[in-house]
Each structure stands twice: as structure tokens, then as C-alpha cells.
Amino acid sequence: MRITEAPIHASLAVTDLARAREWYADKLGWEPSVEAPGTLVYEVLGGSAFTLFETPNAGTAKNTVMAWNVQDAAARVAELRARGVVFEDYDFGEYKTVDGLMTDPNGNVTAWFKDPDGNILTVVSGPDDPRPESLGAMIAASDLGRARAWYADKLGFQPMFELPGIVLGYSSGDSTFTVYQTEFAGTAKNTVGVWRLTGLVDEVARLREQGVVFDDIDFGDGDVTVGGILSDADGPVNAWFTDSEGNSLAIAEDRR
């Protein structure tokens, strides 16, 4: 399977997995579908996925890391506030939030909140967005033109929509992700997005031919990548690479 055919999910760093699990259950009503050492996998909203994983690098990302696309952001914000979620107020100059909500001239409504580890999540709705509720990874870029070229040349992605100099929207498998311009690009010291696919070894080889450089990482306790790939007793598991904007991304063998 090629990376462009695979679903991508956001990867959120936390310092205390038990605390994070409780917060996501109490505040958002989500429970993990898979539990592994140091990692929780969530499959919610009809198939959207994300992971929480323990790392000392939690809290380094200063950019939005995951988008929650809804039909009515104002209504969803009211529901979440009733559960104790605190929404942020931002002033972007021409646009700013009012009581936690920002509305642009096209009628898109956006709100932001943080989890206990400082991960910034956004709730967003658009008047012309026909999608059911879903989650999407948010990937920060300091140079959107450079990022657009890198994702096309190295990974084979072409944007399904683009606001020049602001945002690129991509489809990947049955999921979506967004690359957007921000001064906070490169702040995250953790993995920010993971593609789940089959045939990891073959895809790593193909991507290398496209110029993708895979990282060699020593996680300690004998867990170390070999030729850029981390394996366990059942075979290849993960491989990591860094995009043009300094974001750490991964592909994972989907054994389901």
C-alpha cells in the first residue's frame, strides 16, 4: 500500500497517560479502542482515529495539532463547555475570537482548546462542508510553498483545496490532514502524524527512492530502528521521517 492510499491520524504527546485518558473521557466522552504500553489508540466519530502516547517531549508543540470538523461549531462549543472544556481566546489581527469563537467572512466558525498537556485542538465548521464529524491531523509549516512541493515530490500528495499562503487541505485514504502556515512550525519535538498501512518495508524502500530520509532512533531497552525501521517479534512496526518543516511523521504497519 502506498502512503497516499493510507489513513493518517494525529499523534498527541502526553506526560501522564492515565491523566490524559481520564480527561479525554470526562471532557470529550471518548474512550480508547486499543491500549498498548505507553500508547492509547482512539477510534471515534465513525472511524476517525488519533493516538495519545507518553513522552518527555509532551507540551513542546505550540501549534494546533488536531482538528475536529463538526456541523455546528457554536453548538459543539456550548456542549463541551458544559463538560468543563475551557476555550482559548486568540487575536490574529484581522480576525479574533469572541467568547471563544472566530467567524471568518466565508462563514467558517473556529474555536480552540487545550488538553492537560497543552496540546491545542480546534473545533471547526463551515457552511459548505458536507462531511460528517471527523478528526484530522494538523501539520505546521513555516513556508507553505516549500511544504506543498515537498509533500508532492516526496510523498505524492496533491492538495484537494488551497488557500494560498494560509492552508493546504489533503485527502489520504479515507482520512484528511491539513498543512498550514504558522510561526510555530517546528516547535513539536514529538511525532505529530502517523499513516497506517500494509507493506511497510516496501513502502519505506519506495519512499527512499523518492528522496525521503528515514530517521534512526534508539528508544532504549533494546528498541532501536534498523535501516530506519523499528521491528518487534512479529515483524516491522514503524518508521519515522521528518518533513521539510521539521515535523516528525511516521508510517506504521497495520496488522488488522
Image: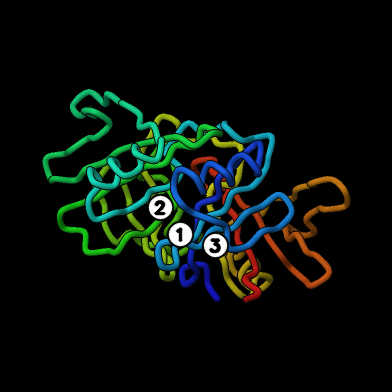
Residue 111 in percent (x, y) is at 30, 38
Residue drawn at point x = 27 percent, y = 64 percent: 131
Q: Which mark is residue 124?
A: none
Which tag, 2 or 3, sits closer to the chain's start?
2
**Type of residue at label 3?**
Trp
**144 or 110: nearer the viewer:** 110
Instruction: Say above or below: 91 vs 225.
Output: above
Q: Which mark is residue 195?
A: 3
Colouring used for the render: rainbow
Q: Is residue 167 visible?
A: yes
SS under mark 1: helix
Does residue 125 appear left or right of residue 114 in this picture?
left
Q: Quadrant of the C terminus?
A: bottom right
**Type of residue at label 1?**
Asp
Q: Which mark is residue 153?
A: 1
For the residues carrying marks 2 and 3, which lies nearer the camera in this image? 3
Residue annotated with mark 2? 149
Instruction: Say above or below: 186 vs 170.
Output: above
Q: Crowdedness of circle 3 by 10 Å Cα count: few (<14), some, many (20+)? A: many
Q: Quadrant of residue 169?
A: bottom left
Residue drawn at point x = 18 percent, y = 26 percent: 94
For the residues carrying marks 3 and 1, which lies nearer the camera in this image? 3
Residue drawn at point x = 80 percent, y = 65 percent: 232
